[in-house]
Image (cartoon, rainbow, N blue to C red):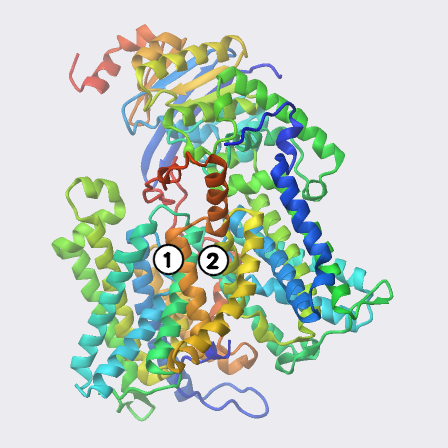
């Protein structure tokens, strides 16, 4: 596994038809850090993720991951740079099994040659078995073995969230973008999430950037927090600093504090 | 597809030796025919776009509504002998009812299925309608007597069949009516709301299901009207529904997301067609598809980008 | 319920994990191999035709069932295969080489279509393929110097490696071998990265992209693979038809292919085979219906498309997984008997999934 690098975002801006969804935002995420982005609905949190994933192209600004200029990569090469992600509204492959989903997670590490695949040559078999083994490690790690053969459409919401996290881990990321990992989960499941986030950070050494509404969870796991509103940066710092920031309180509570 | 080569009135005879430039009055004649044809495509496309905006379903059987409409008007007007106008209204209303039922009974059940299944379903509907029409009304070509059988002369230059003018006027009227309906009436605004966000509209107490079915009914009504108006130009048989595919081609050329774009695209296709058939008889009847494929090949998202990437 | 204990990763890769499956498949293959000893030539030829349609069905299934790309003009690839192969044969090209060229040419045309289709928005592709199908049929009709136009084109005799395969059983074995090859290859495809990237594109382009799948390239590949398989079916079909006219490869034929995969069951290779069996039995049912129904309905030209259409509607509305879905339920019923409950298979309520961004 390659080593985590610094994600540095400078003056990032994007407009949709005149609306500044993200405006002039800069931040750095250090290797091994857990970095949370908070803000009211529509603040532009997911947009930042979509920009880093290169699903959107910024109107201005730069993004680097280590030495790599992310703007030079198309969306499907981002994962090769070591950046994996999950989605706010779970984007799993609904009609495939959990195992197939996770194997697609290995896609960036496999060779997909239709001729070799059609003939299923010994080399292909070997690589299948090898990657299947890696997938099994992740299955053990997130304890989703009981779902292995099931179709996604048969899974509960919580299980889907876990599978999506597992799929992102299968890409062997060094930086993981988690879009609301705890949304829609009950308290117990949220506790599990915080437990896993800790493991991902310490055991796997993965840098985590997450968007989250649950301030308790953010307080538990995040090293630093960035608060944004209307696409603009409000505050950046430790969870306590941000929580006590006047601007942040005004944005959240709508009162002059 | 020999059947799809039909679609417009008698053309000037191609010259036997060499293709020369057409005389001006033939050009005008062809252009007017083309615009009228394009307007008819546009009316069908209007239904496509309305239904697409409301439900994201592309109703491949929409041309069949037009065909059924023509047959329905023919039946009421000539078989039952009620005269053109009462038959026109009744015919269009009965097809509107068919449209309503198709949505309420079938389409509503498969909401959430994959887009592919839904396309296939509506294509299957097209085949069913065509077969049923053949069984009910016969497979022969029929003609419909309309009040528009005269000619209108513009100076000494050219005489225009009034059926063509009727289509153009009807298109303007129907598009205006649709515009007013969606802009001004309570139902229209509710439909717009439902098309933006079905769930939110539902929570606001808007009867989304009924409105969607109603959209289908309106789309079918307009298509049926187009069928009846087009009848003098194309005659009526079971294959005229395939003109719907040309309307779809026009809508794509112009941009599927907006009604004016779709209308313009259809008129463009309609005008290109008679000229292409004249100069390039090899692709007679399929020039609409050639135009669409060329447009899609050069600009896969259509001339006017109106469709968007999914939100994450 | 029969539990399957897996002890090695290879267990996941194997096609036939259960003993029951192995026995079933072996039985079917033995029956197919023994068919020439049991059937008259007429039925043998029909069975061969069924196999050819199974290949064509797998071709379309790869594209529509597995990659989620709808093609309403797939008969065009069948036609391209049939015409290319026949024309090459009549120019004196040996069978095997002609078949290879035909498959490659179909794949190339497919990838060309796929290249522009891959950038198209959702249903634009469905309409573009429909238009493509109509155009290709027109080309077959108009380019008479090459295709014989509407007069038709005679298909040269079937000679493989200098060996004339004139007998029905010889042609049948050729069809069978190629069918098994295609089934095996297509199944391989879907247990390896290429096929999985197709499935990923079908279910969520976004996350496929974020997992490193080049979505455009996957779509182009899917078109290529699909067109190659369908073109192969077309070449074999030519030998069954022995005379090619453009109308055979029209819109109704495309609908027939679509009917096959919908009725058979979207998203499974077995489904395409089931579908081929279904459309092969359909004419028999149709001729039976024609006798039973009153002449006013039974004798009209519309019965076939009406039936095609009705069956598609009924299947999509009531059993979206087609015969394959029924088969799975039936198997589950017997395996779990007597614990089967009707609620074991209940369709989940689903909502309109939007592809639009607002």
* Residue C35, x across and y down, in percent: 70, 59
Q: Quadrant of residue C236?
A: bottom right
* Marks 2,1: beta carbons within 8 A: yes
In the image, residue B251 sits, relative to residue B167, either above or below, namely above
Query: Image point 41% across, 37% down: which residue?
Result: C340
Question: Which numbered tag is attached to residue C258?
Answer: none
Q: Same chain, marks 2 and 1?
A: no
**Left or right side of B212 for A52:** right
Q: How many angstroms separate mark 2 from mark 1 (CA)?
A: 10 Å
- Structural crowding at the residue carrying mark 2, measured as other residues with C-alpha within 10 Å and reported as few (<14), some (14–19) or many (≥20): many
> Is B109 in front, or is A179?
B109
Residue B107, above or below B174: above
Residue that label 2 marks: C126
Q: Which residue lies furthest to the right in this view?
A: C162
Question: Image quadrant of residue C7?
Answer: top right
Q: What element does badge 1 sit on?
A: loop
The residue at 18%/86% (across/down) is B83
Residue A164 shows up from this direction: yes
Q: What's the chain of the residue with tag 2? A: C
Pinpoint the chain carrying mark 1. B
Q: Determine the residue positioned at 27% across, 64% down.
A: B99
In this orientation, which residue lies closer to the viewer: A215 or C276? Answer: C276
Residue C15 percent across, percent down from the top left = 64, 38
In what quadrant of the picture does the C terminus of chain C appear? top left
Q: Can residue B294 be seen in this view?
A: no
Query: How many labels were placed on the picture?
Result: 2
Of A57 and C45, the residue lying toward us: C45
Give the SS element for disc 2.
Answer: helix
* Residue labelled with disc 1: B58
């Amino acid at each position: 596994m390659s080593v985590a690098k610094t994600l540095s975002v400078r003056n990032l801006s994007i407009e949709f038809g005149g609306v500044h969804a993200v405006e002039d935002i800069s931040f750095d995420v250090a290797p091994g850090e857990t970095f949370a982005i908070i803000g009211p609905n529509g603040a532009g949190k997911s947009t930042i993720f979509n920009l880093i994933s290169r699903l959107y192209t910024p109107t201005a600004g730069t993004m680097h991951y280590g030495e790599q200029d992310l703007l030079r990569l198309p969306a499907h090469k981002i994962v090769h740079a070591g950046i994996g992600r999950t989605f706010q509204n779970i984007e799993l492959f609904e009609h495939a099994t959990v195992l197939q989903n996770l194997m697609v997670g290995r896609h960036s590490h496999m060779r997909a040659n239709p001729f070799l695949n059609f003939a299923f040559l010994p080399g292909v078999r070997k690589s299948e078995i090898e990657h299947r083994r890696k997938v099994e490690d992740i299955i053990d790690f997130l304890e989703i073995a009981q779902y292995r053969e099931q179709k996604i459409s048969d899974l509960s919401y919580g299980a889907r969230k876990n599978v999506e996290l597992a799929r992102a881990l299968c890409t062997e990321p060094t930086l993981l973008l988690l879009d609301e990992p705890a949304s829609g989960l009950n308290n117990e499941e949220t506790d599990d999430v915080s437990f896993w986030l800790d493991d991902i950070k310490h055991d796997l050494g993965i840098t985590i950037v997450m968007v989250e509404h649950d301030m308790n969870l953010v307080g538990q796991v995040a090293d630093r927090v960035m608060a944004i509103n209307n696409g603009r940066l409000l505050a950046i710092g430790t969870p306590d600093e941000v929580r006590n920031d006047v601007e942040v309180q005004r944005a959240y509570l709508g009162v002059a504090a | 597809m020999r059947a799809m080569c039909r679609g417009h009135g008698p053309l000037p005879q191609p010259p036997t030796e060499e293709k020369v430039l057409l005389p001006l009055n033939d050009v005008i004649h062809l252009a007017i025919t083309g615009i009228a044809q394009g307007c008819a495509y546009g009316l069908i496309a209007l239904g496509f776009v309305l239904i697409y905006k409301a439900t994201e379903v592309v109703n491949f059987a929409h041309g069949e509504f037009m065909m059924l409409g023509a047959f329905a008007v023919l039946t009421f007007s000539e078989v039952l002998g009620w005269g053109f106008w009462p038959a026109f209204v009744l015919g269009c209303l009965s097809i509107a009812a068919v449209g309503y039922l198709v949505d309420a009974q079938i389409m509503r059940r498969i909401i959430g299925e994959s887009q592919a299944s839904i396309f296939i379903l509506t294509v299957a509907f097209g085949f069913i309608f065509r077969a049923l029409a053949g069984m009910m009304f016969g497979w022969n070509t029929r003609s419909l007597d309309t009040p528009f059988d005269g000619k209108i002369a513009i100076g000494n230059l050219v005489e225009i069949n009034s059926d063509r003018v009727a289509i153009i006027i009807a298109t303007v009227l129907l598009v205006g009516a649709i515009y007013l309906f969606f802009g001004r009436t309570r139902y229209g605004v509710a439909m717009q709301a439902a098309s933006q966000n079905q769930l939110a509209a539902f929570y606001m107490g808007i009867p989304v299901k009924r409105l969607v079915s109603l959209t289908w009914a309106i789309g079918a009504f307009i298509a049926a009207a187009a069928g009846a108006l087009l009848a003098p130009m194309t005659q009526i048989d079971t294959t005229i529904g395939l003109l719907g595919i040309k309307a779809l081609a026009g809508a794509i050329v112009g941009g599927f997301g907006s009604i004016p774009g779709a209308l313009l695209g259809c008129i463009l296709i309609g005008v290109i067609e008679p000229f292409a058939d004249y100069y390039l008889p090899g692709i007679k009847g399929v020039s609409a598809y050639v135009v669409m494929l060329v447009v899609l090949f050069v600009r896969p998202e259509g001339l006017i980008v109106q469709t968007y990437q999914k939100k994450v | 319920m029969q539990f399957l204990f897996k002890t090695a990763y290879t267990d996941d890769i194997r096609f036939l994990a259960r003993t029951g499956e192995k026995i079933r498949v072996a039985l079917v293959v033995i029956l197919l191999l023994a068919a020439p000893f049991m059937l008259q030539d007429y039925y043998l030829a029909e069975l061969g035709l069924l196999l050819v349609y199974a290949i064509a069905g797998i071709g379309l299934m790869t594209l529509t069932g597995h990659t989620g790309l709808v093609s309403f003009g797939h008969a065009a690839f069948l036609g391209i295969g049939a015409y290319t192969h026949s024309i090459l044969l009549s120019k004196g090209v040996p069978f095997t080489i002609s078949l290879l060229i035909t498959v490659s040419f179909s794949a190339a045309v497919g990838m060309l279509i796929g290249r522009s289709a891959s950038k198209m928005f959702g249903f634009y592709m469905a309409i573009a393929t429909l238009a493509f199908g109509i155009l290709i049929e027109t080309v077959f009709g108009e380019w008479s110097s090459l295709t014989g136009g509407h007069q038709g084109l005679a298909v040269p005799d079937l000679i493989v490696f200098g060996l004339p395969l004139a007998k029905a059983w010889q042609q049948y074995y050729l069809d069978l071998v190629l069918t098994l090859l295609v089934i095996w290859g297509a199944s391989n495809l879907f247990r390896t990265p290429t096929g999985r990237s197709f499935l990923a594109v079908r279910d969520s382009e976004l996350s496929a992209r974020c997992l490193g799948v080049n979505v455009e390239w996957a779509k182009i590949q899917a078109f290529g693979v699909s067109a190659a398989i369908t073109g192969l079916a077309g070449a074999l079909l030519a030998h069954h038809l022995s005379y090619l006219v453009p109308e055979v490869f029209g819109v109704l034929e495309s609908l027939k292919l679509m009917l096959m995969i919908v009725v058979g069951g979207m998203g499974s290779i077995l489904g395409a085979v089931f579908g081929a069996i279904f459309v092969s039995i359909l004419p028999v049912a149709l001729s039976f219906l024609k006798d039973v129904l009153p002449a006013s309905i039974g004798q009209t030209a519309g019965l076939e498309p009406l039936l095609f259409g009705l069956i598609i509607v009924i299947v999509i509305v009531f059993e979206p997984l087609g015969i394959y879905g029924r088969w799975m339920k039936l198997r589950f019923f017997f395996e779990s008997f007597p614990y089967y409950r009707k609620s074991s298979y209940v369709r989940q309520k689903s909502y309109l999934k939007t592809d639009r961004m607002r």
